Structure formats: C-alpha cells, structure tokens
Amino acid sequence: MMKISARNQLPGKVTAIQPGAVNGSVKVDIGNGVLITANITEEAIAELALAEGDQVTILVKASDVLIGK
C-alpha cells in the first residue's frame, strides 16, 4: 500500500458517476446520508476503473477550506 501525507481519509461507496468532456463528477456516500462529490479527470476515472458500488477512500488535502454565509 502506498503511504501518503493526507490525514483526512474517508471510506465510502461510489453512488454515481457523471461523465464530462474532460472531467467527471463522482459522488461518494461516506455514511449517515453524507455525500461527497469529487470532480476528477475522465482519464483518472478510467485508470481507477471506477464504477457505481465501488468501495473507495476519499482523501482530503487542502491548504484552504473556505466557508461563506
């Protein structure tokens, strides 16, 4: 297994994949009704062979997290 520096790792299940011209949208259910959407390249979706129902890990590494109201 590859070691990574991201400490925010959330297991979940792919619930939907919406293809796009360059980037696709992947929705992941991490439990308790919480969905996370990741926009990743179509190439990455293909390389990972992502499909609905797959168990995946969401990795969050951000230098900034912004909230507005």
Image (spheres, rainbow, N blue to C red):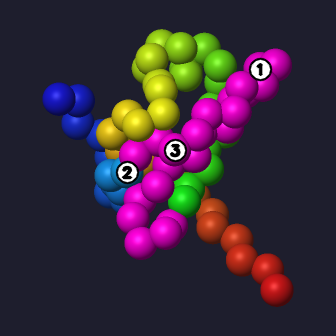
Residue at the disc numbered 3? 15
63 lies above or below 38: below
Q: How many neighbours does mark 2 have within 10 angstroms: few (below 14), some (14-19), or many (20 or more)?
A: many
In this rendering, the label closer to the viewer, 2 or 3: 3
Q: Amino acid at mark 2?
A: Gly
Residue at the disc numbered 2? 12
Residue at the disc numbered 1? 22
Q: Give the mark, 2 or 1, whose residue is nearer the N terminus.
A: 2
Disc 2 element = strand
Q: Is residue 23 magenta?
A: yes
For residue 64, side relative to residue 14 (left or right):
right
Q: Position of residue 19 (x, y in %)?
A: 71, 26
Give the quarter of the figure containing the C terminus.
Answer: bottom right
Q: Amino acid at mark 3?
A: Thr
Q: Position of residue 30 (x, y in %)?
A: 41, 59
Q: Position of residue 20 (x, y in %)?
A: 78, 25
For residue 42, side relative to residue 49 (left or right):
right
Q: Residue at x 47, y 41 (%)?
A: 14
Q: Is residue 39 magenta?
A: no
- Residue range in magenta is 13-34
Q: Residue at x 46, y 55 (%)?
A: 29
For residue 39, side relative to residue 3 (left or right):
right
Disc 1 element = loop
Secondary structure mostly seen in magenta is strand
In this rendering, the label closer to the viewer, 2 or 1: 2
In this rendering, the label closer to the viewer, 3 or 1: 3
Mark 2–mark 1 distance (CA, rounded to whole Å) = 24 Å
Disc 3 element = strand
